[in-house]
Image (tube, rainbow, N blue to C red):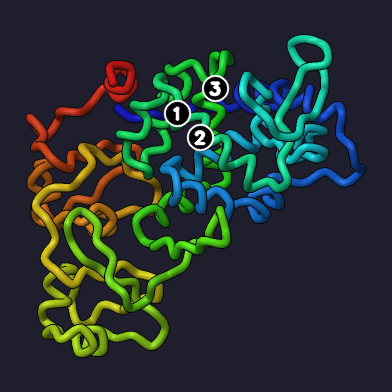
Amino acid sequence: MYFTLSSHKRIFIVSSLLIWNAGALCSQPFEKKLTPEEYILSHKEDAIKEMLLNGVPASITLAQAMLESGNGNSALAFYANNHFGIKCHKGWSGPSYIQDDDESNECFRKYEKVLDSYHDHSMFLKHRDRYFFLFNLPKTDYKAWSFGLKEAGYATHPNYAFMLIDLIEKYNLAEYDKFQDMIAIKSNASDHFPLPAMEMRKSVKYNGTKFIISKKGDSYFKIATELNLEMDQILSYNELKKTEKLEVGKKIYIQKKRRKAMEPYHVVVKGESMKSIAQLHGIRLLNLYRKNRMSFSDQPRTGEVLFLRKRKKSRNHNLNFSSQRAKS
């Protein structure tokens, strides 16, 4: 089972988004409001950084921040760098910002920079038992995370999950989730929030298999020579043909991929192919087809659930993903 938004539901969700953000925007502290595109451009790196450090998908962080802060235009976001409406709570010893919310003069956390707010949001999810199951979900499964947040009680709005999904799909935020296993963190002891850095020739391991990231000027022969491998090995490990163009920034495995992935399922997003999904999860393409009882001429549909560890019971077998997450 996969989720699509009908036209009438999408209209309702757009209306809900306006209502959701009305309180935040009514106290708009400056004349020029940030557009959603401007907000994403300004904070996508913060979201990716937090995903790499603490495991919350960048698409989810961005979508939640856009909802909570009215695209960064709320007074709380502007004056306190608080993009998630996190209140002081017991034990908070940092700066605070006072404004009316459910009650008068409520205490909200104030941050030095926006990234601190993003980090605190990750910690909020990571250290509360009711959200623990979310971190067992694939980082690329934004639909499961959206419904999981709603089921765990993050928000009371009945269409909260659909509101997140609508934002993610409208602004293609899922693209940022693909960085989660392609970029290595280069730690810097002097910086509490280190910037993600591409390790272009140093190998990284995912799903028990080493890979590198292709860079400008690379060729299959050059990579093989530098790593003391045969070019045919590089092509075989990545199920490539000599005629296929090598693009910059692509994951290139330097060992044979595994027969199964670390994650149990993958929900297909727009633009993905069986080959790109196999590369993403470090699973052999042939095994991916076999586990889903598909022929080599088949390509997945957007929203389809692919099996990555076990084999589908039948070609028509699919998951009730909503109920599956509720049991997690």
Q: Mark 2 sits on what residue?
A: 123
Q: Are marks 2 and 1 in contact (CB under 8 Å)?
A: yes
Q: Nearer the viewer, residue 164 or 95?
A: 95
Identify the amino acid type marked 2: Met
Q: Position of residue 229 (x, y in %)?
A: 13, 83
Q: Residues within 10 Å of mark 1 (few under 14, many from 20)?
A: few
Label whose residue precedes the other's in the sequence (1 or 3)? 1
Tag nearer the camera, 2 or 3: 2
- Where disc 1 sits, the SS reads loop
Q: In the drawing, does residue 170 fall left or right of residue 129?
A: right
Q: Residues within 10 Å of mark 3 (few under 14, many from 20)?
A: many
- Where disc 2 sits, the SS reads helix
In which quadrant will I find the N terminus? top left
In the depicted structure, whether residue 164 falls above or below residue 115: above
Disc marking residue 127 = 1
Q: Mark 3 sits on what residue?
A: 160
Q: In the drawing, does residue 286 fall left or right of residue 246?
A: left
**Residue drawn at the location 36% of the way across and 34% of the way down:** 135
Tag nearer the camera, 1 or 3: 1
**Residue drawn at the location 15% of the way across and 30% of the way down:** 316
In which quadrant will I find the C terminus? top left
Identify the amino acid type marked 1: His
In the depicted structure, whether residue 9 falls above or below residue 30: above
In the depicted structure, whether residue 29 falls above or below residue 155: below
Quadrant for residue 302, please give it: top left
Identify the amino acid type marked 3: Tyr
Distance from Cα at disc 2 to Cα at disc 1: 6 Å
Quadrant for residue 138, please give it: top left
**Residue drawn at the location 46% of the way across and 52% of the way down:** 175
Disc marking residue 195 = none
Label whose residue precedes the other's in the sequence (2 or 3)? 2
